[in-house]
Image: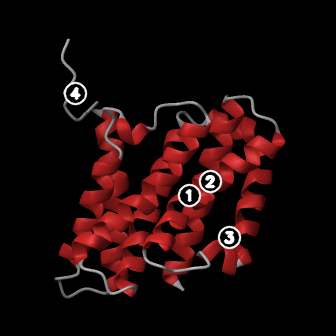
Amino acid sequence: MFYIAIDILGTIAFAISGVLVAMEKRLDLFGVVIIAFVTSIGGGTLRDLLIGNTPVVWMRDSTYVITILVSVILAILFVKQLKYFRKSLFLFDTIGLGLFTLVGVEKGLEAGLLPVMCIALGTITASFGGVIRDILCNEIPVIFRKEIYATPCILGALSFFLLEQLPIVDAYAFAGGILVVIGLRLLAVKFDIRLPNIYRK
């Protein structure tokens, strides 16, 4: 139940993130809904295809579709209130990043994959919805820019496996990994920590 709740919360966070990006681009209602959907389920869909978990989860469980639609409606209705929060898009994107990273790791464990593959799967789950969103909105995906995006996912997933070695409940290790992802992303943006650019003039 705990893991399902995390998955739903991540879906909500990324759906709102998608709505905010789509509205910034002045897309019509259909466009807003599509962007919200691909942001929420893009990474999870790729993850399920990679591990052979088909039909993919949102096709088997209508909860995800309903959650996204409700999130879209609420985000549109309260968009003015959301804009009062500085960098609300960034916050929702970061929360979704942390939640979905560990959801992907958990799916990898269920599939019996090695830890390194679980870490890769967590990163894909968290970041590729945003990649598809940015491409559809004619933006260079954040993951391919200097801004740190995938690195917190990798380190958060790694933290989960390290915490699991301690005598604590799995849920605490899970929550710890999420907090590492969110914390590192917030710190990276606050202090303008970036990966080196290999481009030379």
- The residue wearing badge 3 is 64
Q: Position of residue 119 (x, y in %)?
A: 29, 67
**Distance CA(mark 4)–CA(mark 2):** 29 Å
Residue placed most toward the observer, 92 or 22: 22
> Is residue 196 visible to us here?
yes
**Mark 4: which amino acid?**
Asn
Q: Amino acid at mark 1?
A: Gly
Disc 3/disc 2 C-alpha distance (Å)? 12 Å
Q: Which mark is residue 197?
A: 4
Question: Which amino acid is tagged 3?
Answer: Tyr
Q: CA distance from mark 3 to mark 4?
A: 38 Å
- Which numbered disc, 1 or 3, marks the residue closer to the eye? 1
- Which residue is located at x 46 percent, y 68 percent? 47
User: Does the residue at mark 1 contact the one at mark 2 (Cβ under 8 Å)?
Assistant: yes
Q: Residue furthest top?
A: 201
Q: What x and y, as percent, mark residue 7?
A: 54, 71
Q: Nearer the viewer, residue 22 or 156?
A: 22
Q: Which type of secondary structure does the marked residue at label 4 adopt? A: loop
Provide the secondary structure element on which disc 3 rests.
helix
Classed neighbour count for the residue bearing mark 3: other residues with Cα under 10 Å, few (<14), some (14–19), many (≥20): many
Q: Which residue is mark 2?
A: 38
Q: Quadrant of the N terminus?
A: bottom right
Three-letter code for the amino acid on which mark 2 is drawn = Val
Q: Is residue 88 visible?
A: no
In the image, residue 183 above or below residue 142:
below
Above or below, 154 against 57 in this view is above
Local secondary structure at mark 1? helix
